[in-house]
Amino acid sequence: GGINMFCSKCGSKVLDGAKFCFNCGAQFSKEPETAEDFVIEVFDHVFDNSIRLGDKVYILRRDRINKKIEDNIESFFLDYRDEVPLLVFDYADNLKQGFVITNYKIAWRYSDKIEKHDIWEISNILVERVVLARAMRLVDGHYRKSSRIYLTGIRPDMEFVEKFKEFIEILNS
């Protein structure tokens, strides 16, 4: 319902009440929005509530997580007071392995190491076939690749990768 709105910058159809254009990123709201709020809005748009990615993936404003996962997100993955976890992939043992996407970064934990990449520095995502699984690597603006982020347990894994790529592309536009 509602009136059809169009972006004054690129002409794309705009959702009623949207604060920015999902095609070109133009902002509509008068009050300044933080970059972190923008990340949350883009995430909500791309990973909308209907998407299901297997029983190890949690979209945090929709799915319940257990207290142990919640504590581990706080202990190992969050670095800023206003950091909001958006998606969790609990590969093993209450996040002893897995990753978290927040409004600041993506961070993953494997064999007691944690690697973190600022969401704004990611310019591309590569997918590799690794024995019986797929893994993705993040690429920054200097073409440096992250270590592998294994996607085992995400179903369908390529749908997740496509959504994540779309998320990063909108942030970079």
Image: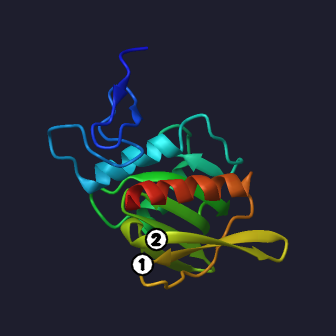
Quarter holding the C terminus is bottom left
Structural distance between the alpha carbons of marks 1 and 2: 6 Å
Q: What label does residue 121 carry, if any?
A: none
Q: Amino acid at mark 2?
A: Ser
Q: Splitting the image into 4 quarters, where does residue 49 fall?
A: top right
Q: Position of residue 145 (x, y in %)?
A: 54, 83
Q: Is residue 119 left or right of residue 30?
A: right
Asked if residue 26 shows in the view, the reply is yes
- Residue beneath the point at 26% across and 43% down: 27
Q: Is residue 167 left or right of residue 104?
A: right
Q: What label does residue 123 carry, if any?
A: 2
Q: Is residue 26 above or below residue 160?
A: above
- Residue beneath the point at 59% across and 63% down: 95
Q: Secondary structure at mark 2?
A: strand
User: Quick one: label 2, few (<14), some, or many (20+) residues within 10 Å?
Assistant: some
- Which of 3/34 is in front? 3
Q: Position of residue 3 (x, y in %)?
A: 35, 16
Q: Is residue 10 above or below residue 150?
A: above
Asked if residue 60 shows in the view, the reply is no
Q: Are marks 1 and 2 in contact (CB under 8 Å)?
A: yes
Q: Is residue 31 above or below residue 152?
A: above
**Most distant residue in the left direction:** 31
Would you name the residue on which mark 1 appears? 141
Q: Position of residue 150 (x, y in %)?
A: 68, 70
User: Quick one: label 1, few (<14), some, or many (20+) residues within 10 Å?
Assistant: few
**Most distant residue in the right direction:** 132
- Residue beneath the point at 67% across and 62% down: 91
Quarter holding the N terminus is top left
Q: How many marks?
A: 2
Q: Amino acid at mark 1?
A: Gly
Q: Is residue 10 left or right of residue 53?
A: left
Q: Position of residue 84 (x, y in %)?
A: 37, 53
